[in-house]
Amino acid sequence: TLVGAGEIVGRARRAGRGAAAFNVVQIEHAQAVVAGAERADAPVILQISENAARYHGALRPIGAAVLEVAAAARVPAAVHLDHATGAELVDTAIELGFGSVMYDASALEHGRNVAVTAEIAARCHARGVWVEAELGEIGGKDGVHDPTARTDPDEAAAYVAATGVDALAVAVGTSHAMLTRTTTLDLGRIAALRAAVPVPLVLHGSSGVPDEGLVEAVAAGITKVNIATRLNQVYTRAIREHLAADPEVVDPRRYVASARDAVAGEVTHLLGVLRGPGAM
Ligand code: G3H
Ligand code: ZN
């Protein structure tokens, strides 16, 4: 069933659980995420980044396919636009039926970030769409890891008040696209942000965080947990193994299906981790 990410995140926050948001690149990723969520019997957020849309040449074809996959899920599933930097892409996502977007103006100068994000938030809210924004640039998207960036709690509270966003991505020690799970989270900073900021907090770059760290992050005050690289690692490893074991294979459906199964297993595992020790 297609639901809004705001509904999934709101419910998770009230229950003190984490809400996983998995990045999908191809339709097989979306199928894998839904299969993994159905196995875990947990709601799930599927997100398509601006970069993934660029890979496909446009958001429309992949966005429409992912919406179909989410709508057919036997668990609540949301489709979210991730790291959008252009207003046009946000409009396209809304037209397609995405229930939420992340507008990433974190690379802009602070005053511009506030002004542009407030404008996008107002435009999304007028159409019933939930909005996430980022304050305190989380690095790594360019492959350069700098886990020292931090979001200031007072600045974050003022930013949320000024922009009206529904969730805030914060810099608390993570970096995007980490290939090893070696991130040390600034749990004190998460707790301080949680106390200062009225909306749910979002962890980006979660692939660099070990499972125990994800549990601690949620306990300290994170709600939405964005995971991309970790699924890509599992996907690509499965394809490598398949090709090595079956050098004669020609039909891509064979090895991509292996990757899809592997990703589904990882999604089930991660949803179990984020459900937390108190639940079930
Ligand atoms: O927005 C997406 C996430 O922040 C994913 O980060 O690739 O490090 O898991 P990751
Ligand atoms: Zn991110």
Image (cartoon, helix red, strand yellow):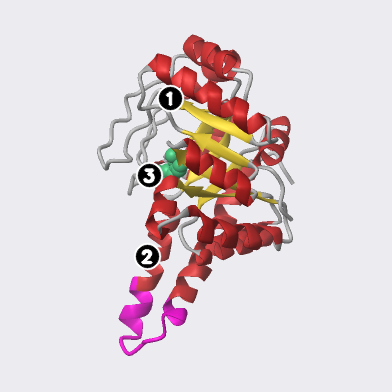
From this viewpoint, which residue is outermost toward the bottom? 248
> Which residue: 73% across, 36% down?
11
As measured in the structure, the alpha-carbon distance from the residue carrying label 1 to the one carrying label 3 is 15 Å
- Mark 3: C-beta under 8 Å from nearest atom of ligand 1: no
Task: Check disc 2: other Cα within 10 Å, few if <14, some if 14-19, many if 20+.
Answer: some
> Which residue: 42% across, 77% down?
255
Write down the quadrant of residue 106 in the picture.
top left
Up/down of 45 relative to 41, above or below: above
As measured in the structure, the alpha-carbon distance from the residue carrying label 2 to the one carrying label 3 is 17 Å
- Which residue is tagged 3? 181
Q: Earlier in the sequence, mark 1 or mark 2?
A: 1
Residue 263 percent coordinates (x, y): 50, 62
On residue 236, which mark appears? 2
What amino acid type is highlighted by mark number 3? Answer: Arg
Q: Which residues are magenta?
A: 240-255
Q: Are marks 2 and 3 in contact (CB under 8 Å)?
A: no
Of residues 138 and 243, the one nearer the viewer is 138
On residue 244, which mark appears? none
- Which residue is tagged 1? 186
> Which residue: 45% across, 81% down?
254
Question: Does residue 261 belong to the magenta stretch?
Answer: no
Give the foreground label among 2 and 3.
2
Task: Check disc 1: other Cα within 10 Å, few if <14, some if 14-19, many if 20+.
Answer: some
